Image: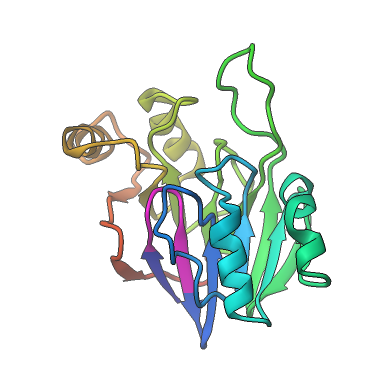
């Protein structure tokens, strides 16, 4: 299985000729989801769900399907009958040949005055976990964690503790579109071997467009 980092919170996974895209939002490339056989969306915020990017992918491939929570599904289901599937915590399904588990229910707290929206994370092939905008612990071993390093709802101490609790073999940054070069360097130092310790996980930042092999199953 191969993982390609796209802009901000978006990644592409490929395996056995199938392509799965997670969270092609407004901070990702305009063609981030083009060519996908299946798209997963964690929640409704525009940096994770961009209707134009999603529609372009589903129109480009008439066999492509979408799995997401109700708040997103209801916005596009009428245009793509039979191709939009609503999921929630505890569900399992197969999309484009990938086995997927759904974990989590709510977006992290941004501020007590801001209502929390629903949010789910996806564990793909029992190996790669994308939590969306929450620090969800899936309750089972994770080989590759897609780590939301920077957002209005988190701080670096929480990210360190999250890595310690999930204990993946490796972690790749996502949700990093708001960081500049100085910010990437600071986070890299804090989450690397010179930082406070992240439970033995190997932390790496991938430049958008970079592709790496990832394991299926752990």
Query: Does the image show residue 125?
Result: no
Is residue 82 or residue 18 the one in the foreground? 82
- Residue at point 35% right, 42% down? 177
Whether residue 12 is in magenta: the answer is yes
Residue extending farthest to the bottom is 17
Q: Is residue 171 above or below residue 79?
A: above
Is residue 104 rendered to the left or right of residue 45? Answer: right
Viewer-proximal residue, 123 or 181? 181
Between 89 and 199, which is closer to the camera in this rendering?
Answer: 89
Say if the magenta span includes residue 78: no
Where on the picture, by quarter, is residue 106?
top right
Q: Range of the magenta residues?
A: 5-13
Q: Position of residue 57 (x, y in %)?
A: 57, 70
x%, y% of residue 207? 26, 56
Residue extending farthest to the top is 113
Q: Quadrant of the N terminus?
A: bottom left
């Amino acid at each position: 299985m191969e993982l390609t980092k796209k802009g901000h919170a978006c990644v592409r996974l490929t395996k056995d000729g199938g392509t799965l895209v997670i969270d092609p939002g407004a901070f990702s490339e305009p063609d981030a989801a083009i060519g996908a056989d299946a798209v997963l969306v964690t929640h409704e915020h525009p940096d994770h769900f961009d209707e134009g990017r999603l529609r372009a992918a589903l129109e480009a491939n008439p066999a492509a399907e979408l799995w997401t929570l109700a708040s997103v599904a209801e916005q596009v289901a009428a245009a793509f009958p039979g191709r939009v599937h609503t999921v929630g915590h505890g569900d399992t399904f197969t999309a484009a040949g990938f086995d997927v588990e759904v974990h989590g229910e709510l977006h992290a707290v941004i501020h007590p005055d801001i209502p929390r929206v629903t949010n789910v994370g996806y564990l793909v092939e029992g190996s790669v976990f994308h939590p969306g905008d929450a620090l969800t612990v899936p309750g089972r071993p994770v080989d590759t964690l897609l780590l939301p390093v920077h957002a209005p709802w988190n701080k670096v101490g929480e990210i360190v503790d999250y890595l310690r609790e999930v204990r993946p073999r490796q972690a790749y940054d996502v949700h990093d579109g708001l960081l500049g070069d100085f910010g990437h360097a600071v986070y890299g130092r804090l989450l690397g071997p010179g930082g406070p310790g992240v439970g033995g996980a190997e932390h790496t930042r991938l430049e958008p467009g970079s592709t790496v092999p990832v394991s299926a199953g752990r």
